[in-house]
Image (cartoon, grey):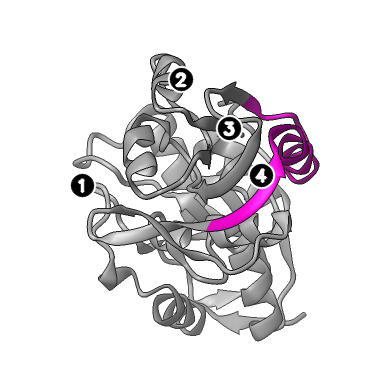
């Protein structure tokens, strides 16, 4: 059985993703959130750290769970009920948890947005969507019809995105920022794009897209953020010679 050092994997992640260069959401913890006994024989990747994905990781016989949305976002509250069950399972099954939020959105190669752009065949990318002092997404100049772009997104996401067709039928300046960036539609416009690909946003963005003459694609918060965790896990698997698996636990959002 191949095995690797947890500290070596975490060190590589920290060096590669450079979380210290990002100002993240208040309460977010980028890095090792739960340690284990120190060895890793199998990596599981997921979008969210939750009781459900912890159980899936245990069933997959993984001892490191790599996620985009970690366990900690707010001040610690009592570890009772399902929270107690989760921490008990993590310790009992020697399962470590590593989380990377904004650093795994903005990474030039492994990030959600970089991988989406690569999958769509976008070239000559420029940094896009500056938030909290860091660029999280990418933009490109490319002429493509809304229908063709929708078809390409359907292919990589596995489902057709929700299109709010507020702009021209022909897209020319396209920006990509995964997750819940829809409410920042105006910011995307100000950064020079006429088409914005993201995960989700509020109802009022439909009218806003028309007012701003923009096309808005919602591919799903969950689906647009599967790319980074899978890319990171695959990278770690290759470097440290341990197998990996993706745990698909869709939220429907």
Compute the Cα span from label 4 to label 1: 28 Å
- Residue 56 badge: 4
- The answer to which of marks 4 and 3 sits earlier in the sequence is 4
Q: Is residue 41 visible?
A: no
* Disc number lying in front (4 or 1): 1
Residue at the location (48% across, 40% down)?
A: 179
Q: Is mark 3 on a helix, strand or loop?
A: strand
| Residue holding disc 1 | 26
| Mark sitting earlier along the chain (3/2) | 2
Q: What element carries label 1?
A: loop
Q: In the rendered structure, which disc, 4 or 1, sits on the residue that comes first in sequence?
A: 1
Q: Where the C terminus falls, by quadrant? A: top right
User: Which span is picked out in magenta?
Assistant: 140-162
* Mark nearer the viewer, 4 or 3: 3
Of discs 4 and 2, which sits in the foreground? 2
**Number of numbered discs:** 4
Cα distance in 3D space between marks 4 and 2? 42 Å
Helix, strand or loop at disc 4?
helix
* Circle 4 crowding by C-alpha within 10 Å: few under 14, some 14–19, many from 20: some
Q: Residue at x 66, y 44 (%)?
A: 56
Q: Is mark 2 on a helix, strand or loop?
A: helix
Q: Return the residue at label 3.
A: 217
Does the magenta run of residues contain 144?
yes
Name which quarter of the figure residue 125 lies in: bottom right
Give x and y (percent) for residue 156.
Answer: 75, 46
Residue marked by disc 2: 210
State the CA–CA distance, disc 1 to disc 3. 27 Å
Q: How crowded is mark 3: few (under 14 residues within 10 Å), some or many (20 or more)?
A: many
Q: Which of marks 2 and 1 is in front?
A: 2
- Depth order, front residue of 35/137: 137
């Amino acid at each position: 059985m191949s095995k690797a050092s947890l500290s070596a994997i975490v060190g590589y992640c920290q060096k590669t993703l450079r979380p210290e260069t990002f100002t993240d959401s208040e309460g977010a913890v980028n890095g090792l959130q739960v340690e284990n006994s120190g060895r890793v024989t199998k990596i599981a990747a997921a979008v969210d750290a939750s009781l459900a994905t912890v159980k899936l990781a245990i069933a997959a016989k993984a001892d490191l769970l790599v996620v985009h949305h970690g366990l900690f976002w707010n001040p610690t509250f009592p570890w009772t009920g399902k929270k107690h069950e989760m921490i008990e399972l993590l310790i009992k099954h020697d399962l470590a948890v590593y989380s990377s939020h904004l650093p795994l959105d903005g990474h030039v190669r492994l990030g959600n947005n970089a991988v989406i752009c690569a999958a769509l065949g976008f070239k000559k990318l420029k940094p896009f969507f500056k938030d909290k002092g860091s660029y999280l997404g990418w933009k490109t100049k490319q002429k493509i019809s809304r229908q063709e772009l929708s078809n390409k997104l359907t292919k990589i996401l596995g489902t057709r995105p929700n299109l709010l067709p507020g702009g021209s039928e022909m897209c020319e300046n396209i920006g990509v920022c995964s997750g819940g960036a829809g409410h920042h539609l105006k910011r995307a416009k100000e950064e020079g794009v006429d088409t914005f690909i993201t995960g989700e946003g509020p109802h009022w963005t439909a009218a806003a897209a028309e007012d701003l003459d923009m096309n808005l694609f919602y591919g799903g918060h969950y689906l647009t953020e599967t790319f980074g965790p899978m890319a990171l896990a695959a990278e770690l698997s290759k470097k440290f010679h341990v197998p990996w698996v993706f745990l698909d636990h869709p939220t429907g959002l």
